[in-house]
Image (cartoon, rainbow, N blue to C red):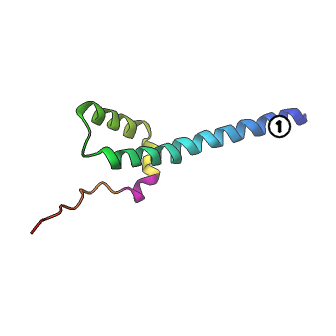
Amino acid sequence: MNLDLDANLVILIIYAVLAGAYLLVMPAIVYAYLNIRWYLASSFERGFMYFLMFFFFPGMLLLSPFLNFRPRRRQIEG
């Protein structure tokens, strides 16, 4: 009986870690990658970026209040 409870607890912890990685950790990494490469990406890399956005969409939705994809300010030399 006790062994069964321990196995269930381990499975529950594994599910919680995987859910946290899918919903919070990986979207944060993808967001950082997109923020760095957005204006420099080739067409293949841009397609890969769109795939990552689609794959981690639920996590991106959770992080969306913190995302900022506005264009960078231009430096006007005078």
Taking the view exactly as shown, the residue that stands out farthest to the left is 78
Classify residue 44 as left or right of residue 57.
left
Classify residue 76 as left or right of residue 7.
left
Which residue has dot 1 on it? 6
What x and y, as percent, mark residue 20? 58, 45
What x and y, as percent, mark residue 29? 45, 45
What x and y, as percent, mark residue 30? 42, 43
Q: Is residue 17 magenta?
A: no
Quarter of the rendering occupied by the C terminus: bottom left
In front of the other: 29 or 53: 29
Identify the magenta region. Answer: 63-67
What main secondary structure does the magenta stretch of the protein show? helix
What x and y, as percent, mark residue 25? 52, 46
Q: Secondary structure at mark 1?
A: helix
Classify residue 13 as left or right of residue 65.
right
Decide: few, some or many residues near mark 1? Use Cα within 10 Å; few <14, some 14-19, many ≥20.
few
In front of the other: 56 or 76: 76
Quarter of the rendering occupied by the N terminus: top right
In front of the other: 26 or 73: 73
Taking the view exactly as shown, the residue that stands out farthest to the front is 78
Among the 4 quarters of the image, the one containing residue 4: top right
Among the 4 quarters of the image, the one containing residue 16: top right
Q: Is residue 68 above or below residue 34?
A: below
Residue drawn where x is 40% and y is 48% of the image = 31
Taking the view exactly as shown, the residue that stands out farthest to the right is 1
Residue drawn where x is 27% and y is 57% of the image = 70
Residue drawn where x is 34% and y is 33% of the image = 48
Give the residue type that dot 1 points to: Asp
Q: Give the number of callouts.
A: 1
